[in-house]
Amino acid sequence: MTRVSILGSRGYTALELLKILADHPEVQVVAATTRQEGNPPLTDIHPCLTGRFDLDCQNLTAEEVGRVSDLAFCCLPHTASMEAVPQLLEAGCRVVDLSADYRLNDPGVYEQWYQHVHTDPTRLETAVYGLPELYRERIRTADLVANPGCYTSASILALAPLLAEKLIDPQGIIIDAKSGVSGAGRTPKLGNLFSECNESVTAYGIGTHRHTPEIEQVLADVGGLDVRVAFNPHLMPMDRGILCSIYPRLVEKRSQKDLLQLYRTFYSAAPFMRVLDRIPRTRDVSGTNFCDVTVCFNRDQLVVFSALDNLIRGASGVAVQNMNLMLGLDERTGMLRC
Amino acid sequence: MTRVSILGSRGYTALELLKILADHPEVQVVAATTRQEGNPPLTDIHPCLTGRFDLDCQNLTAEEVGRVSDLAFCCLPHTASMEAVPQLLEAGCRVVDLSADYRLNDPGVYEQWYQHVHTDPTRLETAVYGLPELYRERIRTADLVANPGCYTSASILALAPLLAEKLIDPQGIIIDAKSGVSGAGRTPKLGNLFSECNESVTAYGIGTHRHTPEIEQVLADVGGLDVRVAFNPHLMPMDRGILCSIYPRLVEKRSQKDLLQLYRTFYSAAPFMRVLDRIPRTRDVSGTNFCDVTVCFNRDQLVVFSALDNLIRGASGVAVQNMNLMLGLDERTGMLRC
Amino acid sequence: MTRVSILGSRGYTALELLKILADHPEVQVVAATTRQEGNPPLTDIHPCLTGRFDLDCQNLTAEEVGRVSDLAFCCLPHTASMEAVPQLLEAGCRVVDLSADYRLNDPGVYEQWYQHVHTDPTRLETAVYGLPELYRERIRTADLVANPGCYTSASILALAPLLAEKLIDPQGIIIDAKSGVSGAGRTPKLGNLFSECNESVTAYGIGTHRHTPEIEQVLADVGGLDVRVAFNPHLMPMDRGILCSIYPRLVEKRSQKDLLQLYRTFYSAAPFMRVLDRIPRTRDVSGTNFCDVTVCFNRDQLVVFSALDNLIRGASGVAVQNMNLMLGLDERTGMLRC
Amino acid sequence: MTRVSILGSRGYTALELLKILADHPEVQVVAATTRQEGNPPLTDIHPCLTGRFDLDCQNLTAEEVGRVSDLAFCCLPHTASMEAVPQLLEAGCRVVDLSADYRLNDPGVYEQWYQHVHTDPTRLETAVYGLPELYRERIRTADLVANPGCYTSASILALAPLLAEKLIDPQGIIIDAKSGVSGAGRTPKLGNLFSECNESVTAYGIGTHRHTPEIEQVLADVGGLDVRVAFNPHLMPMDRGILCSIYPRLVEKRSQKDLLQLYRTFYSAAPFMRVLDRIPRTRDVSGTNFCDVTVCFNRDQLVVFSALDNLIRGASGVAVQNMNLMLGLDERTGMLRC
């Protein structure tokens, strides 16, 4: 059994990781960290894990975790991750980092969007971006995988086939993204209270959302051209799920049928991609690692839809998928439940 | 007291009308129709009206309603309305029609989108489109007001100032609209069940939604040019509210500040328009007749947001606003409650 | 116009008060306080009030408020209220206090349930409990009205007719109460996050909820006997509304019909009480000051149901109803909207 | 691989069964029936199963299903089940029946509560009630298992330890049950529309709910005494989950600690029972086959809480648990996912 650990156990991504790992046949969770005093049982922090884990959370350093683990999932906030990851790697522990700290190649871009100097810039070159549909082979041998953002995965997976074939204008792609509230995390804030979110829809972070440069960087890599997106996130009155409605400009006439075929070919080896003939619903991917996509036309306008569970396919599910690849396992191991 | 009636009492727009009219100081509801046998009390159909109305619903003809009413709200489905409206008008009763039957000027366009021949085409010329912010003066003297659709109002009010000033390309305006489930009506269908809609977001009617020609017709009238929109409606897991996120192409450089000023000027005489410096939330207009709008930039891309309550501002509230104008009252009468 | 003020403007009860007062024909809001620096516009704190109030919140003392107001609504937390109320009254300002500080007659009971010594115990004798259906006449002339708790109102209004007639065992009344999340207030806490509350039901405060002694005190006053309730509050995945399902032991055989008649007689002069022949839904009272009640039998077991909007009838609506009585107005003034 | 089939594929319990069976290592789904014409693919009926099943639904008779299956899950409505089950059994196919048709021992009681004569009364004697925590050994060898109702499971599992020890008065047990909307099924009706259920709580079926005789029958069997419950179901604005709040009268003084120990002993061999020291939340059992229970005191009043997922533990999960036992497998097979 591979020994795995979680750094930062309190949040929703840690919880979803633990729920998947509880049934994973090839790994054992050996440590879960918290800054909270008193070594609280994991089930105090996440009551739904009662009966599944007999483990206390501990206030361990990254180095201590690294010494007892073969692989660690880093669920720390950005800037905290770049402190912990070097210690984990130096202790010989491979890492799937769920923060944003190793996603961007250019430390200058990181500084621009996160208002923080990157303290581990050289490692940005060796970190592998953890989107298996694009970087499967590199992930297998990586020591450090930068797990993608939730909006990012939904946006990239929807657009990659079109950009790879240079079928759309890489400038001015409009992404209208709709997310459930769990994407905002488990720290209490006015904006994620039930009585503020329920029965309400709004947009936020127009022009400033930090997933923007991540989307542009990966899509530029796929398409070999500079990409510029207008990324417009919206908050939905639901717990989980993301739907991206994307409006690209087609530069070459193609039918819906051709485009669906293109997507099916592009994702033929991807077990968690479902190319649909109908518009996806977030409900149909909830609790799963699937990403559902389709393309259609609104008269002349091409529209691409993608749906995923922001906590699973957008965070903890793909993290396990990455771990499976790193461990030489079938990427579906422990995760086929629909 | 003006005698008003409701044709078609069972649905949500009839309910919201009745809730507003219950406190309206200048009108009295004299009849409410239903096809249901047995003259059920209105409070059997809408329990929340208990104590507010002592009225039985009756299976009356439009002609019978017209004889006892000064003004009727027609809450019938499309195609049924064009049967009833001529009878009401011939009986001397003015009409606010909440169906789509008198919204489109061209019976051919009606036939194309509704798959039904229009049986009262000549009256399309005299019907006034009931958006007071654009047609206030004509509404005052109209005998037949075609009350706008919910998505339509949100879209038009968001775009009218830009098109009036010819600041955007009238072709290829992308509208990403998000609506609560009450917009789908009160008739039980799989698609509006709680267990299908809750915790889910999806899109529908891409390229086929019937509010499309209505939006294009009115905006063309405002801008003096053909308008073409890609209208993309989405279903949200909430009861009521619409948010439109609109992505037009600016043809002339303008700052956010200039554009907000343009909107404030355009709507300076409109008591139910609120031009905001921030992104609207549907929660903030819920239960009110307000439409909140703002404009901002996502880097280069202009984005316009509008929010309204689909049942009030998108249907029954604006219907009362139209009635107030038709009766020579202040348009806010009976409706200021925020 | 009567000059009224709000102490503590940030919460949901203050917001609902302001929404009602915005349309109230007889009062003007002259001040709203906050501890927040910089005199923020009221519409910054509550965006939905945009266009309804042109008022800045100020960091005023209770004395300062008292000098410019005829009546103040105190929306402060418990223990803060008993600091402010004496200053308001001494400045000649009448008070409706929405906190718990003046609800209990006995300072010892207050100390037991609130773990805080009451610093203004003598005023407990003159404060009038603000449930108009029971204490209408005393409220008219009161200078200090202790506005009831939300669960309390629903429980008392459901049980008062039975206890007044001594038809039930006053010991061992089981109250199973279900509330929306807004009852937990607007301060961010883990327990009122969307992602914790949505799609979940739970109970809390079993045996310790502070509305218990309030219910027992008022019902004892109504029935002339000691009353003991097992009060069991539950948290529902909704914003607003309370349903109480109450299981009393009938000591004398009565039919449902007799009991409904008893309730109708008891509440014949109460414009906001609706005695129904069917089980109430919280949806049907949402946004209104109505309390809907019914009684029925589950085979031998008497069941009483009551439903109200926790923020309106359970807090701000009844506060305005109390104000109306204090000002000699019809108690419905400004509030009939269903 | 055991060949299993589903009769009646359209509803939510069939969907949840299929989701569990998709990953079950020991069975293969060989047939799924529908009355719908044209052999629609299963994924047309349940889009979320895309990629998991390559199976068309067929309009097969029970006999045809029986011939190709080792075990069938009958998800038909009551009265339809008693037509199909005899045919299945006669074809040599074992059955887990999710309807109510074989749950009650006495055909007279069935007729009284279901207003329908039982057409297969002799088989009521051999059918085994499918609650593994009470009837595990009999289930192993049964040919026909009557899968329990959702409310029933939650109620019985909460009360069985107390009645087995004769610690409570078996008469007059008050059960206040709260359920998500999916319990009402997938057939469109006014009462399960999003816009009727959302933001609302109500009760229904007081004194008439059909789970009442089922609860009483099984608890009488456990306790050896007649049992009478006042069962009060409520509808919550959520998709799934049941919380039962139960108010029994203790006939012998016991501490909370003693009672929790009693529950732990009673359920020591039950892998899906979790006896908690805190009040359960439905969220913590959602998507799982766990039933969480606790006992506590509200001053003198004993309160028992139980929580489960109505579609999993209350229907399809326990159906697979029953199948596992019938097939000689570990009852947890295919179901540990939390």
Image (tube, coloured by chain):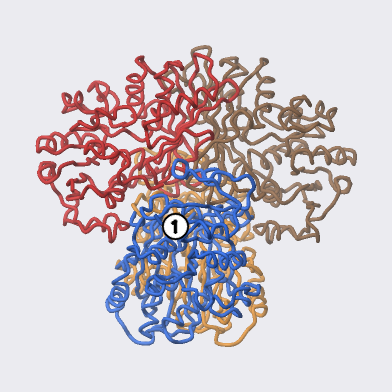
Chain colours: A orange, B blue, C red, D brown
Residue A112 lies in what quarter of the image?
Answer: bottom left
Q: Residue D233 at what x, y percent from top left?
A: 57, 34
Q: How many numbered markers are drawn? A: 1
Residue A171 left/right relative to D76: left
Q: Is residue A234 above or below residue D267?
A: below
- Residue B292 position in % (x across, y down): 36, 65
The quadrant of the rendering that contains the C terminus of chain A is: bottom right
Quadrant in which residue B243 is drawn: bottom left
Residue at position x 22%, y 23% in the image: C107
Mark 1 belongs to which subunit?
Answer: A
Q: Residue at x 67, y 71 (%)?
A: A268
Above or below C311: residue B317: below
Please give the name of the residue rendered at 18% of the width and 48% of the height, measured from the top-left corner: C1
Question: Regarding mark 1 in the picture, which secondary structure is present there?
Answer: helix
Q: Which residue is mark 1?
A: A183
Foreground of the two, C258 or C206 = C258
